Image (tube, rainbow, N blue to C red):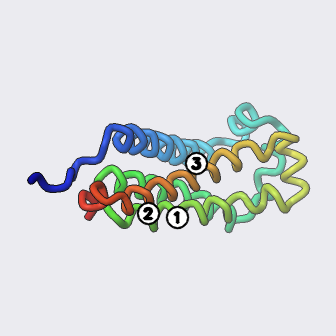
Amino acid sequence: MSGPNLKPNGLFWILAVVFLLWNIMGCSMYLVEMTMSDEAYAQSFGAEVAAVRGDFPIWGIVGYAIAVWSGLLAAILFLLRKKLSVSVFLFSLIMAIIGFIPSFTNSILREAYGPQFWVMPLIVVLLGIFEVWYSRRMLKASDVSLAFS
């Protein structure tokens, strides 16, 4: 009789790398946005968005920062098969939602971002939900859960 398979399948590893790369991109985007000059910001995002850059509340920026860095931590923990990854993915998702609140509630920001302002928040939230769901699923899977510590 052989024991349970303690190795996650190939899909786990593929998704773990996708999660890691996605969260690295989020951290990179955060660093780029926060360190850009106003001129470079206007070139990248348009003059309308640059004009309202200062209207974004600090708590929204803090939500954004915490979301991307905790997302990266969660992806690393997931890759290392740590149970804590589920909670950190959930925390990152909550912080992302908090970070997006000003975009949806401030009409000045919403108008500057244009009619497709909701696309990136939707992608981020849907992928965040998937990260939480999949990491929880891996913990509940009988064989794979034994490989998580």
Q: Is residue 14 above or below residue 79?
A: above
Q: Please name the residue that numbered disc 3 is placed on.
A: 127
Q: Is residue 146 above or below residue 126?
A: below
Q: Residue at x 78, y 61 (%)?
A: 102
For the C terminus, the image quarter is bottom left
Cα distance between the residues tagged 3 and 1: 11 Å
Given residues 129 and 105, the one toward you in this image is 129
Q: Please name the residue that numbered disc 2 is placed on.
A: 86
Q: Check disc 3: other Cα within 10 Å, few if <14, some if 14-19, many if 20+.
A: some
Q: Earlier in the sequence, mark 3 or mark 1?
A: 1
* Discs 3, 1 touching: Cβ within 8 Å: no
Query: Left or right: where does residue 139 sit relative to residue 95?
Result: left
Q: Which mark is residue 90?
A: 1
Residue type (three-letter) at the residue carrying disc 3: Leu
Residue 62 place in picture, x, y as percent: 61, 64
Q: Residue at x 33, y 37 (%)?
A: 10
Q: Which mark is residue 135?
A: none
Residue 86 place in picture, x, y as percent: 44, 63
Q: Residue at x 82, y 40 (%)?
A: 116
Residue type (three-letter) at the residue carrying disc 1: Leu
Q: Examine the image and state in which quarter residue 145 appears.
A: bottom left
Residue type (three-letter) at the residue carrying disc 2: Val
Q: Examine the image and state in which quarter residue 138 appears.
A: bottom left
Q: Is residue 43 above or below residue 29?
A: above
